[in-house]
Amino acid sequence: MLKNKSARLLEVVALLLLGLVIYVVTSHDAFLYQQPIGQVVKVNNGPGQAQSDEFDNHDRVTSQYLKLKILNGKYRNWSVNLKNNYSKSGALDQKFKVGQQIFLDVHQVKKGKINASIATYKRDTYLLMLCWLIFSLLFLTMRFQGLRSLFSVAINFVIFLALVQFDVAWNQTYFFWIFALGALIFTGLSLVIVLGFNKQCWVTFSSIIIGTGLGLLLGYGALWLTDSKGLHYEALDMATQDPEQLFFSITLIGLLGAVMDAATDIVSTVFEMKASMPEVSKTQLFKSGHQVGKSIMGPLINVLFLVFFAESFAIGVLYFRTGNTIAYTFEWTMSLGVVQSLISGIGIVLVVPTAAFLAAQALGGKKDVSH
């Protein structure tokens, strides 16, 4: 027991030291960047000024006068003075403080003075510290199982970026199938990394593919029968290709995540039940898996809608604050998200009996005794 506590303490200390190293290194890594980076050494804040618009939206804008020291490049150790305006709402700007680092755009150097402007805030320290925190929590709570999950997320992220690059490079008319293939790859890789190449992996994979396919098919069928009335696919942000295909590509990825969550829980429970009670029957396995599915179905669907509400909250408030009606705001900012959530909900409902049935059939069990 004492040995285990000592090992645990060493792990915590090692993780804390790793976090300290990451913080120190990323705070002094300006030399790694080609774009000039300035560190704020002095800040003078002017008086705030109240502002309002024709829709009676109120804000307060303050001017900052910053002195920065350039940390890298040929202008290293030079000083530059900049003006920054920030609002109380912080919608499109940011307040800077002493010690923060900023990417700069240098326009010209005249009479020994640099003419530059703020490009963006340097965030690598915060990003890597957040990654360190996630890594540490997963390792301390789930050990190597958690790290495998994190690794699968990283691999899938890289694959997703590659698929987007393929889509941009090929410029296909029917690009939905690129992301459909990606969904198969995401599912297979994630399950193999986390579960291993075994029967549980195959059952979970089959359940996910069936649930996702049926959910998407039913959703598409409903929209086809109603001719997508009330939906504006063109309302998607930054849609540079066929917006309808883009919508279904996005829906597929979201649906896959929801179905994967439900199927993994159900199949894992059924396999654990079989391992602890080898004599359990197929019917009992199915009922137990189905009961687990019913228990998690409601919370999962609620999570989907909460995520949707969180994503659409800001743009919805903006529409309301600019005098738009509830119907117009819903139609242009929320209708697509609601449909995506509904399709994901359909997939969750369908995968519950599918996962329970496939898991029970794959494990077999004691034959039921009929009375």
Image (tube, rainbow, N blue to C red):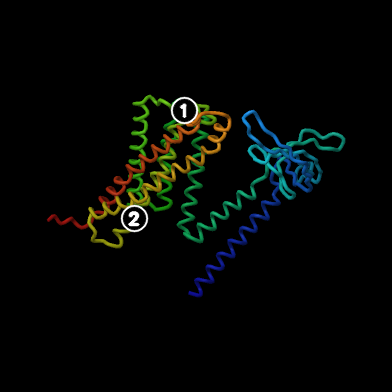
The quarter of the image holding the C terminus is: bottom left
How much space separates mark 1 and mark 2, taking CA atoms?
Answer: 39 Å
Q: Amino acid at mark 2?
A: Thr
Looking at the image, which residue is at 28% across and 48% down? 358
Task: Determine if residue 234 is in view.
Answer: yes
Would residue 312 be found to the left or right of residue 228 on screen?
right
Dividing the picture into quarters, in which one does residue 60 lie?
top right
Residue 242 coordinates in the image, percent (x, y): 47, 26
Residue 364 coordinates in the image, percent (x, y): 24, 54
| Residue sitting at the far left | 371
Label 1 sits on residue: 233
Label 2 sits on residue: 269
Residue 232 coordinates in the image, percent (x, y): 46, 27
Q: Amino acid at mark 1?
A: Tyr
Looking at the image, which residue is at 62% across and 61% down? 17
Would residue 19 be found to the left or right of residue 82 on screen?
left
Would residue 137 be found to the left or right of residue 99 on screen?
left
Looking at the image, which residue is at 62% across and 30% down? 55
Q: Is residue 170 above or below residue 261?
A: above
Near-viewer residue (290 or 201): 290
Q: Is residue 285 above or below residue 229?
A: below
Indicate which label's residue lies in the foreground, 1 or 2.
1
